Amino acid sequence: MTRSVPPVSVGDHSIGSHNALVTLIEYGDYECPYCGEAYPVLKAVQQAMGMRLRFVFRNFPLVDMHPHALRAAEFAEAAAIEGQFWAAHDLLYEHQNALDDESLIVYGDRLGLSRVGLLAAFEGSVDAKIRTDFSGGVYGGVNGTPCLFINGARYDGPRDVDSLVAVLDQMARTSA
């Protein structure tokens, strides 16, 4: 583990207790196939760790490689404004092959999102949040996705469920 990222703040999307012994931060891109592969692994890790883990997602859209990544991040941030971030996050990863504007509008309807709010996000109303996430990742040395940090320090080890849970368990024991 090496470089660090900005500490978790109230502006971050997190699930789990803010008093959890371990915080796992993912810098992700909704269109990235590697993030798509990591999605079920990270869900299983969250399940296995329970209340000992706080999971944080930060946007890191790789727009040069993924043409729909920014729009998907805007969709997720529009959903966050309406208290639907995690539902949107999951929906985007579960439908990674359909992130065009028309699909995002359908997903917004499915989640009951305000069409006005969603269109405002597509016109840039949430871009400052995305830039903040992205620049924090750059500061921490993120150069691809998914990029994981445990308690603020970059983690480049194995990314299977058992390996991640073992590392997180160890971190929880040393943090207790």
Image: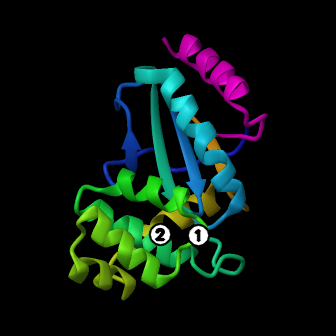
Q: Nearer the viewer, residue 162 or 101?
A: 101
Kindly identify the amino acid type of the residue bearing the numbered disc 2: Ala
As helix, strand or loop, the secondary structure at mark 1 comes to: loop
**Residue at image point 44% right, 83% down:** 102
**Residue at image point 30% right, 78% down:** 118
Residue 164 sits inside the magenta stretch? yes
Kindly identify the amino acid type of the residue bearing the numbered disc 1: Pro
Q: Nearer the viewer, residue 135 or 125?
A: 125
Q: Nearer the viewer, residue 107 or 77?
A: 107
The image quarter containing residue 139 is bottom right
Residue 38: image location, x then y, percent: 66, 46
As helix, strand or loop, the secondary structure at mark 2 comes to: helix
The magenta stretch spans which residues? 153-176
Residue 61 tag number: 1
Residue 103 sits inside the magenta stretch? no
Labels 2 and 1: the sequence-earlier one: 1
Residue 36: image location, x then y, percent: 64, 55
Residue 1: image location, x then y, percent: 73, 36
Q: Main secondary structure of the magenta part?
A: helix
**Residue labelled with disc 2:** 73
The image quarter containing residue 124 is bottom left
> Left of 117 or right of it: where is 19?
right
Measured in 3D between alpha carbons, the distance from the residue under mark 2 to the one under mark 1, in whole angstroms, is 7 Å
The answer, for residue 84, to whether it is visible in the render is yes
Asked if residue 49 is positioned above or below residue 30 in the image, the reply reads above
Residue 114 tag number: none
The answer, for residue 21, to whether it is visible in the render is no
Asked if residue 45 is positioned above or below residue 42 in the image, the reply reads above
Q: Are marks 2 and 1 in contact (CB under 8 Å)?
A: yes
> Left of 90 or right of it: where is 87?
left
